[in-house]
């Protein structure tokens, strides 16, 4: 599984290199290693939960359904801490097809629970489809978590949605434009860890790493710790089970900008300020 290999490789290389660097500098390698191992375990865990979510037993409740242009209604049960996974089955067409209506399908789903309702919309796209959307998604009030690519570059076959409520829901297809998808398979799966928890880990670990780097000149520790913790956040929002290396890799860029760039830059300034203060005291 290439997604798991990429996540494991990035975590191991980042943690291993930084621990080796701390040991060479004798800059509190034990404390630094502990922070790195905690930070590295978060994207590993979140990545696994997004590409291998726990599935519910279909015999235990209405956790699966199928909708299409003809089948426009379904009933589902959403337990707390679970999400809706939408997977498209494509219509067979010629490989040289260029009609945008046959290359994409925009859909909108409306879910109504006992005391809540919400919409979810997505765009199914073949790998040969262009970037310009020629179909109308429609709908409003969407809360989407994760757009899924399959192994082919540029192909969107799967979306994951989380909702403000749970329990028994009535689902209706309120928009279906384009003919790329024949059906949409709906399945209730375990949701990734809450985003608030992950952001809390980002803040807490980054502060500890900043203090350690400034106090003991543990160069680049804060940036690497923040990068790993932030990567978990972006993996959570951008990856679902059909994903290939593209979405896994795309989550690295914002994590690097915020972790190595922003947090690493703050740590660098803190180290410089601490060094200047030490010289004045001397």
Image (cartoon, rainbow, N blue to C red):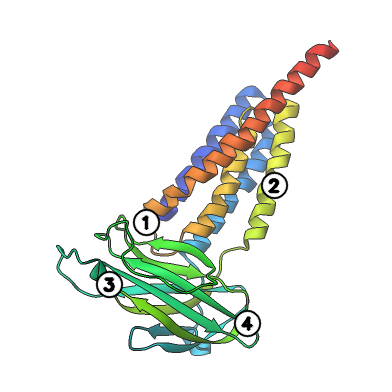
Q: CA distance from mark 1 to mark 3?
A: 20 Å
Q: Quadrant of residue 233?
A: bottom right
* Residue 184 in view of the camera: yes
Left-right relation of 209 to 4: right
Badge nearest the viewer, 4 or 1: 4
- Mark 4 near mark 1, Cβ–Cβ under 8 Å? no
Residue that label 1 marks? 244
Judge left or right: residue 182 versus residue 244: left
Q: Position of residue 151 (x, y in %)?
A: 32, 58
Name above or below for residue 140 compared with residue 32: below
Q: Where does label 3 land, which residue? A: 180
Q: Are marks 1 and 2 in contact (CB under 8 Å)?
A: no
Cα separation, mark 1 vs mark 2, equals 29 Å
* Residue holding disc 2: 203
Dot 1 or dot 2, earlier in sequence: 2
In percent of the image, x 37 and y 56: which residue is there? 244
Q: Residues within 10 Å of mark 2 (few under 14, many from 20)?
A: some
The residue identified by callout 4 is 116
């Amino acid at each position: 599984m290439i997604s798991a290999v990429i996540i494991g490789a990035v975590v191991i290389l980042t943690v291993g290199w930084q621990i080796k660097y701390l040991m060479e500098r004798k800059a509190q390698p034990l404390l630094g290693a502990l922070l790195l191992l905690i930070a590295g375990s978060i994207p590993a865990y979140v990545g696994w939960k997004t590409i291998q979510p726990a599935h519910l037993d279909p015999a235990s409740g209405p956790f699966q359904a199928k909708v299409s242009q003809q089948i426009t209604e379904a009933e589902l049960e959403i337990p707390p801490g679970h999400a809706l996974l939408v997977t498209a089955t494509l219509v067979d067409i010629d490989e040289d097809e260029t009609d945008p209506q046959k290359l994409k399908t925009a859909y909108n789903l409306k879910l109504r629970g006992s005391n809540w309702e919400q919409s979810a919309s997505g765009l199914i796209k073949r790998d040969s489809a262009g970037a310009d959307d020629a179909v109308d998604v429609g709908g409003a009030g969407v809360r989407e978590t994760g757009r899924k690519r399959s192994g082919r570059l540029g192909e969107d076959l799967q979306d994951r949605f989380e909702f403000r409520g749970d329990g028994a829901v009535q689902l209706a297809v309120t928009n279906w434009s384009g003919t790329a998808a024949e059906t949409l398979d709906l399945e209730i799966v375990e949701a990734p860890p809450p985003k608030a928890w992950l952001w809390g880990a980002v803040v807490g670990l980054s502060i500890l790493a900043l203090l350690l780097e400034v106090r003991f000149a543990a160069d680049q520790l804060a940036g690497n710790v923040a990068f790993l913790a932030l990567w978990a956040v972006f993996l959570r929002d951008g990856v679902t089970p059909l994903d290939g290396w593209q979405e896994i890799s795309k989550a690295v860029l914002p994590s690097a900008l915020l972790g190595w760039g922003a947090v690493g830059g703050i740590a660098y300034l803190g180290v410089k300020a601490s060094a200047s203060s030490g010289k004045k005291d001397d």
